[in-house]
């Protein structure tokens, strides 16, 4: 199968973009896709600078009334197969959500369907998790629909919430899990190992058991202790 063509939409620092590009690079000839376009609503997004450093086509798209048309044209001219939102904070225009149905995904930094919805991004998500007293959080990769954070869930990764956590520590722990989960999920989508059926259900999935990082709760780097879920359930 030919390599799928990915566009990544970004608004911020772009650590997920970097994780995806590095994952695909590391897979070499086994990779299923290439990032061929990075687009942002912000000219000063760190993610655009990273893309340019890596020689990837990087575009800032104006947020005026030409936005929907310009972004649509960029995606279509680059013959994009899969749209990956990585810290993109704008609503994706309806025509793009429609044209890429089943081929547009997002990563959210909490376990959906909790702690999502309009306005739930960045620190607010982790604040809400802490305020609710949840003991688990972690990233969710989901298909994008016209409702914020409500598209079908493709993959999740559990991350513990520790007593005494603050927003920064929890955000950093979840982000490390995102960097492991999102590239693998995108690779699986591009390879056709997971897809969205016409009835809205997700078919197939990420074979976490086959991954080297299978079922590991990602903990703080400084504690240097990754607990496997098997160990937790053994008690
Ligand atoms: C991540 O926390 C992701 O879950 C959310 O936005 C953040 C993006 O971070 N959607 P980065 O720009 O990829 O570093």
Image: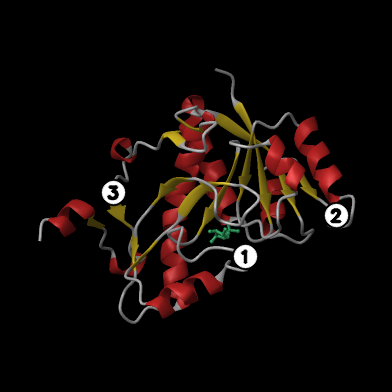
Q: Is residue 72 left or right of residue 193?
A: right
The disc placed on residue 215 is: 3
Proximity of marks 3 and 1: CB atoms separated by less than 8 Å: no
Q: Residue sitting at 79 percent across and 58 percent down?
A: 43
Q: Tell me the CA gap for discs 1 and 2.
A: 22 Å
Cα gap from disc 2 to disc 3, whole angstroms:
41 Å
Task: Answer whether labels 1 and 2 touch (C-beta < 8 Å).
Answer: no
Q: Is 45 located above or below residue 195 in the figure?
A: below
The residue tagged 2 is: 62
Of label 3 and label 1, which has the lower sequence position?
1
- Please name the residue that numbered disc 1 is placed on: 118
Q: Residues within 10 Å of mark 2 (few under 14, many from 20)?
A: some
Residue 38, given in percent of the width and then of the height, sits at 70, 45
Percent coordinates x, y for residue 71 in the rendering: 80, 44
Give the side of residue 184 with respect to residue 92, left or right.
Answer: left
Q: In the image, ligand 1 is in what quadrant?
A: bottom right
Q: Give the structural element (helix, strand or loop) at label 3.
A: loop
Q: Residue furthest left?
A: 235
Is disc 2 in contact with disc 3, using a CB cutoff of under 8 Å?
A: no
Question: Mark 2 or 3 closer to N-term?
Answer: 2
The quadrant holding residue 7 is top right
Is residue 66 visible in the rendered image? The answer is: yes
């Amino acid at each position: 199968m030919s390599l799928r063509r990915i566009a990544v939409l970004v608004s911020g620092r772009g650590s997920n973009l970097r994780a995806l590009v590095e994952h695909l690079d590391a897979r070499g000839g086994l990779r299923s896709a290439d990032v061929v376009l990075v687009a942002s609503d912000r000219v000063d997004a760190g993610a655009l600078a990273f893309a340019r450093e890596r020689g990837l086509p990087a575009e800032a798209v104006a947020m005026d009334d030409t936005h929907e048309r310009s972004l649509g044209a960029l995606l279509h001219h680059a013959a994009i197969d899969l749209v990956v939102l990585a810290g993109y904070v704008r609503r994706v225009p309806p025509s793009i959500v429609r044209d890429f149905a089943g081929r547009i995904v997002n990563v959210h930094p909490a376990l959906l369907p909790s702690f999502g919805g309009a306005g739930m991004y960045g620190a607010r998500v982790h604040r809400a998790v802490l305020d609710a007293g949840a003991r688990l959080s972690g990233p969710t990769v989901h298909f994008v629909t016209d409702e914020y954070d409500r598209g079908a869930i493709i993959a999740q990764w559990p991350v513990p919430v520790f007593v005494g956590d603050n927003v920064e520590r929890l955000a950093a722990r979840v982000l490390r899990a995102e960097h492991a989960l999102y590239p693998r999920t995108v690779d699986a989508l591009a390879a056709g190992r997971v897809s969205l059926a016409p009835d809205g259900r997700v078919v197939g999935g990420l074979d976490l058991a086959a991954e080297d990082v299978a079922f590991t709760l990602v903990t703080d780097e400084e504690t240097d202790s990754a607990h496997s879920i098997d160990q937790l359930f053994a008690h």
